[in-house]
Image: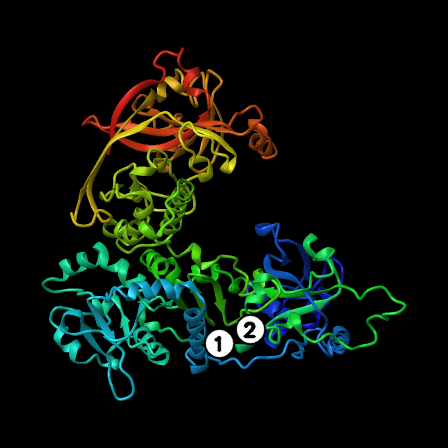
Amino acid sequence: MLCAVCMKIFQSSELSGNHHQNSNDVETAAKNGCRICQEVGDLFPPVYAHRLTYRLRKWRAWANTEFFELRILWETVFIHVSRADGFPDGYDKFLNSSRADLDTDPCRVRRDFPTQRLIADNTGHESVTALARKWLNDCKREHHCEQVLERRRQQGWFPSRLVKVGGVGEPPCLVTREKGRFEGAYASLSHCWGENPSFLKLTTSNLDELCEEIPLASLPASFRDAILTCQRLDIPYLWIDALCILQSGPGSESDWLFHVSGEMSRIYSYCELNISIDVAASPEEGAFRSRDPSFLQDCYVWTTHAHLTTPSLSHPKPDSLEPSSDSKQEDHSDQHPANSNPSSSSSLTDPVTEPPPPIINLYTIFTKTDLNHALWNLPLGKRAWVFQELLLSPRTLHFQTDRISWQCERRERLTEYLHDDTGPSSRAKFGLKLYYQVQYNLEEGGGGGDLREDNISKQRASYYDRVFQYTARELSRPDKDKLVAFSAVARHYATFLGEEYHAGVFGSTMPIGLLWNVGRVPPATRPGDYRAPSWSWAGQDGRVFWHNISELEGRQGEEFPAGGVEKVMLLARVEDARVELVDETNQYGQVKGAWLTMKGPMMCWRDVIGSYREGDELGSATKRIDSGEYDSIVRTGVGVKIWLHADEPGPWSWNSRVPWGRKPQRVFMMAVANIKLTEEEIQRREAFRHKELEDANFDSRCVGLFLRPLEDGTFRRLGNWKADIDVVERYKAVAGGFKESTVVLV
C-alpha cells in the first residue's frame, strides 16, 4: 500500500523528483499505511521542514539483477522489476483516483490494490503458527531437507535429555535417553541468555524434580512460547540448552564438555525444526510481539513506464511471458498479482489500428526489514553461539520484531510479507534477500560429500567466510568459548578439509590460511589472557577476514583462473604443528598452547626500511605514502612498495616514527607466497588504482607475515603484508636480505 505521492513516483518515467512537502506529511502517510513512508519516517529528525526529493537508480549491490533502489534522504527502499501479463481489473480507475488524491489528500493510502490479506496483530496468534505449519509441511513434502533428516532419523539418535512439551492437561517435563525411548521428532531452541540470567535452569539438585514436571509458570516467556509453538506444530519434544545441559552441581562440567565435544553438532543437525527467538535479548522477553498488520500487506505497483526496466526486460521475445522452468514446478498462477486478469478496458489498445499493447511491469516494494540484515541486527543475530546453531539446523523458524520467517536447506527465506512462494521471477519469490539458505547449511562431507579438488577449494573459501561471519558476533566469555562456540562448524568442515585442525586453522589450508586480516570497525584487539596462538584468528577479538580469498585459493605451481589468478607459488611451508588441548577428546575446542614450525625467506624489518635517525618518519630511505587506522603503504629505498596491516592498532602509532616503536630490529618479515594474476585481471584493476600508487605493482604480489622474536626464541605474529611480487629478489643484493629461516610461532 502506498500514498498518492509514492504512487506518483512509479507512474512517471522520471528518475528523480519531489516527494512530500515535509516530515509531517511523511508521518501522516506512514500512519495511513504507506509502506515507503513508514520506512522513511523512522529516520527523520523530530522536525524536518524541507521538501523531500527522491532518486531512482540501479541497485549497486546486484548490478545485473532486476533490482533498483529508491533513495529518499538517507533511507533506501528496494524495488524488484518483473513482467506482468496485464493490469488487474479496475486498476485504471484506481490510478485515476490516486492521481486525484495528489491535489486533495496526497497522504491518502488507497487499499484497493493489491487485495488485502487478513493478518493477525500479534506473532503469537494461532494463524501465524498455521502459516509456519504450512511452511514446515511444504518443506517435508517438496524439499531435499526431509530426505537428509530421514537418513539421520534412521540412526535412531536423540539428545541425552529433552523437554516433553505436553499438551492440554499435561504439563511439560524433562525426559532422558537412558530412561526410555523417544517417540516422535524434537525441535531445538536458539535464544539469548541475557545478562545475569536468573531463570530456571537444570542443576544436579533439581534434575529428578524436573523429570516429574516443569511448572510452566516457573519458565521465562521465551521457553513458554517455544513450548506452545511445538504443541501447535505437533512436535512432541523440545531441546533447550538451559534445561537439557547441567548448569551447576556435581558433574556439570563433564556434562558441558560432553555436549560441546560432539553432541551439540548432532542436536541441531537432527532436529525437526529450530525455533529461533531473534527478537528477545533475554528469555524473559518472549517470542511473541504485537504489530501493525498493515506493514505486512503486499505492496505491488503495475505500470507501463519503463524507467526501471532492465535490459533483460526491455525487449521481450513473444514467449517471454511464459512461466519459467522454476515457476512451472509450482503452479500458483491464481495467487500472484503478476498473473492477474488483464484489464478489459478499451482505453489500452485497438488490435486493428494500434501497435501491440504496451509492456506492463510489476514493481514489488521491499524495505530493509525484508532483508537478512533485519535478522542480523536483532539481539540473537549478534550472538556467536547461535551462529553454529543456525548453520547446522536443517530448518529454522525465526521470530522477529513484527513477523515470523522461515529458512531451510533448499529454500530462500520466507516471511509473512509476500509469504506465498509464487511469482514470475525466482528473485521475487520469497522477498528481497537473495541468499539461499543452502549457503548457511553445511554440506555433508565424507561419503556423501563432493571431494573433488575444485570443490575442496570452494570449501576452503567457504570456511574462511564462516570465520568472517562468526568473528563479527559477540561472546560473553570469549576466553573460554571462542573456539568452542565454533567447534561444530569446524567439525563439519573437517570432512572436506581433513582432520588436521590446529586452534581454528586447518592444516590443509596452511600456510595461506595464516594470512588473515583484522577488521577496523570496531577496532580488533588481542586479549591479555591466553586463548589461542598469535597465528590463529581465534586469538583476536573483532572481525577477521581473508582479503581476496579467490586469489589466495590457488595451488602451488598450477594454473588457477578463478579470481583472475594465473599461479600461486608458495615460498614458505609449515613443517610441524602441535596443540595442547583443554579437553583431549575435542580437538576443535579450547586450547592451552600451540606451536607452529615454519620455514621460509625472512628479513629484518630494519633492513627493509633502511637506516633511520631520530626524527625521521620511517628512515632516510623510506617514504610513507598512505595510512589508515591500521594500514600503511611505504616505499622503500630500493623502490619496493609494501602494504602493512597490523593485528592491533598499538604498534602503528606514527608518533613513534617507525612501526612497532623505535626497535625495528625486533620485527621480521616472512614471505609466504607469490600470487601472479592474469593480464586480463591486471588490466581490469587499472581502473581502480589509487592516484598515489600509479606505479605500484599490487596486482601480482608477494604476501607474508610480520613476526616478532620472544625471549625464549619463539616468534609471535604481529600482522601481515603484501608487496611487489619481486620483493624477495630485489632485496637479495641488500645486506641482511631475505634468508631461508626456520622459526617456531606461538
- Checking the image for residue 291, the label placed there is 1
Q: Nearer the viewer, residue 308 or 42?
A: 308
Q: Residues within 10 Å of mark 1 (few under 14, many from 20)?
A: some
**Tag 1's secondary structure?**
loop
Q: Are marks 1 and 2 in contact (CB under 8 Å)?
A: yes
**Tag 2's secondary structure?**
helix
Q: Position of residue 267 (x, y in %)?
A: 27, 63
The amino acid beneath tag 1 is: Arg
Q: Position of residue 25 (x, y in %)?
A: 66, 71
Q: Residue furthest bottom?
A: 169
**What residue would you read off at disc 2?**
295
Q: Residues within 10 Å of mark 2 (few under 14, many from 20)?
A: some
Question: Is residue 693 depicted above or below 3 in this figure?
Answer: above
In the displayed structure image, the side of residue 75 where residue 544 appears, left or right: left
Question: Is residue 545 depicted above or below 566 in this figure?
Answer: below
Q: Nearer the viewer, residue 436 or 109?
A: 436
Question: Is residue 654 depicted above or below 185 in this figure?
Answer: above
C-alpha gap between disc 1 and disc 2: 9 Å
